[in-house]
Image (cartoon, rainbow, N blue to C red):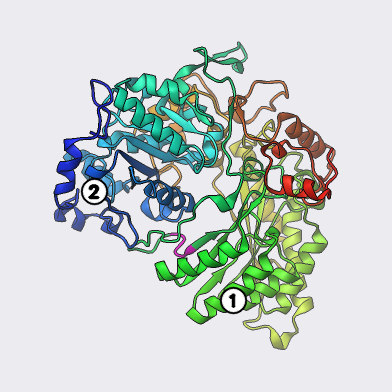
Amino acid sequence: MASLEKNGMAQSGSRHEAAGSRERKLALDDDILMRIEKPERYIGGEVNAVMKDPSRVEVRFAFCFPDVYEIGMSHLGLQILYDMFNRMEDVWCERVFSPWVDLDAVMRERNIPLFALESQDPVRDFDFLGITIQYEMCYTNILQVLDLAQIPLLAVQRGEECPIVIGGGPCTYNPEPLADFFDIFYIGEGETRYRELISLYEDCRARGTGRVEFLRRAARLPGLYVPRFYDVTYGEDGAISSFFPVEEGIPAVIRKELVTDMDTVSYPTRPIVPFLKVTQDRAVMEIQRGCIRGCRFCQAGQIYRPVRERDVESLKAYALELLENTGHEELSLSSLSSSDYSALPELVDFLIEECGKRHVNISLPSLRIDAFSLDVMSKVQDVKKSSLTFAPEAGSQRLRNVINKGLTEEAILKGAALAFEGGWSRVKLYFMLGLPTETLEDIRGIAELSNKIAATYFDTVPKEKRNGGRVQIVASTSFFVPKPFTPFQWAAQCTKEEFLDKAYQTRTAVSEQLNQKSIKYNWHEADASVMEGVLARGDRRLGEVIRRVYEQGGFYDAWGEYYDNDRWMETLAECGLSADFYTHRLRPLDEILPWDFIDCGVTKEYLKREWEKAGREEVSENCKEKCQACGAAGFGCGICFAERQKGKQTVL
């Protein structure tokens, strides 16, 4: 069998052959499918979904995105790893998503085990259950998935018959709140180490070594963290006093896995095309990983360093294959900062010509608003239907310097003027409230900058050319959540009451502006932002909190209509913990942080330097202008290696 047997790991055999000989049968009968919302979420069989004969594979891997289908199927990482696994002849990777609340109730009532979409087989019969962990508020959904799959929630309670539960994604850069529930965490990019892990699994199964010994050997592979082989102690103040491996040979530090050459890894040119409209309903092409900008609040900008580009000729070929194999009417370029891709002009010119022939729209997110970007957008967007997005993040230049945004008010207003001259009349602005060192003047700056952009429209566009009359400015604020491996990982986070007061001050300031009728203001939920902060920088003690909240009926916490803040706060108190301990206090620079055992490539010394520079309101140059000696050059690839080879960078 492909699953782990109670007597140890048995070799592949009859059960897979039997499964291969039967016709595919849906796990849900017609009666259920007719009763639930969007049954297409659960039937599989979409265009480009991979079907294999289970009797001809050695390992079955269930890849789970712990949220509703429409969200999970919009995630590029899922498509990349699904394609990677299914290129392996001995592996069949299938997809799993969190059932929506209506089906969740039916599955519990009828004792229907959670199933994978392709084969419709129960997840509990697979060898691996891989869960991508993209955001903190999905943690209770992870327990929903385990529970519905009839897999014990706690890793230590799983027997030989249970799948190996492995987690990946950005939240594994602090896996400790989830340590009780996972057998393995994969730290870093998934293309590098899975082949070795799966081969180890096949070897251990053939030798009958058993589950724990397999995990012990897996813990010695680079990039893999197996929580059961580590222990943690706490001091009287509640902070961590020690974190250490409990067996000899288990590494004390886990270094992230990184693709050093983006052109040596495959890219999915036959992505699955959903039956129903999903959140990102388009073909997506990743042009690079990493970001040169160094914004001090941004976790992705740190953990995905260094910047590594894909070859432009390969991207041209990928684009044509994607369009041919999907039938999508839109192609989007994926990157943290598309404007910084060195061959963007050449790529865009190619796409404009090829997509024009096929009547396919081009989406270019993450562009900096400059003359080149606006020229490109004017060619690829329907001006009447689109709005432009700016992300100043802070209302004042002082605070933009603190966060190292690298964007001046002059550049923002100049970009707005160019946009208005080009025919745009709708602008979305994104800001954060509660950033370190924020003052009332910074908060009022959000309204004042919005007003200046509106005024720029009236100064730039003559009355006779103002289609519809008034410019539309939508200013949205989220609440700042400090994240691991950023210069702000030591910062204090605001309380719910402080956040709401800041939102009120922003709304009041907007109402005082001359162009207030042109400005719409939106803000995020404050209580969920605080809880996100707790989970983002939490430790192992939060595992009991997450489990209790789930057992009280809590899941889909990322969805406002299902989030119950009282339940979380009361459970924290019952477990002897408080939100303020994890969020509201300023952490000392010498405190042991729950994620300190992970080496993400950027050094703690660099993060400390950037934290101190933030306090002095100093700006750091981006990676192309000057190396900041963050540590990512240690991977010997990407922009660090290329620029050093050219001798163009000054190394601190």
Please say whether residue 281 is one of the residues in the magenta stretch.
yes
When asked about the image quadrant of residue 508, the answer is: bottom right
The structure residue drawn at horizontal position 76% and vertical position 73%, both measured from the top left corner, is: 417
The circle on residue 581 is none
Residue 167 visible? The answer is yes
Residue type at mark 2 is: Asp
Q: Is residue 33 left or right of residue 263?
A: left
**Is residue 473 depicted above or below 289 in this figure?**
below
- Say whether residue 87 is magenta: no
Q: Is residue 586 left or right of residue 646?
A: left
Left or right: 347, with 168 as reference point: right
User: SS for tag 1?
Assistant: helix
Of residues 97 and 239, the one drawn nearer to the viewer in this rendering: 97
Kindly identify the amino acid type of the residue bearing the numbered disc 1. Answer: Ile
User: Dot 2, how many residues are within 10 Å of its Cα: few (below 14), some (14-19), or many (20+)?
Assistant: some
Q: Is residue 399 visible?
A: no
From the top left corner, tell me how far across and down residue 544 is, in percent: 43, 23
Q: Which mark's residue is nearer the viewer, 2 or 1? A: 2
Q: Residue at 47% x, 61% y: name it.
A: 280
Local crowd size for mark 1, using a 10 Å CA cut-off: few (<14), some (14–19), many (≥20): some
Q: Which residue corresponds to mark 1?
A: 352
Viewer-closest of 85 and 288: 85
Q: Which residue is mark 2?
A: 53
Which structural element holds mark 2? Answer: loop
Residue 52 x, y percent position in the rendering: 27, 50
- Numbered marks: total: 2
Span colored in magenta: 279-283
Q: Residue 574's spot in the image, x, y percent?
A: 44, 21
- Could you give the CA–CA distance between mark 2 and mark 1, rounded to whole angstroms? 41 Å
Q: Nearer the viewer, residue 45 or 646?
A: 646
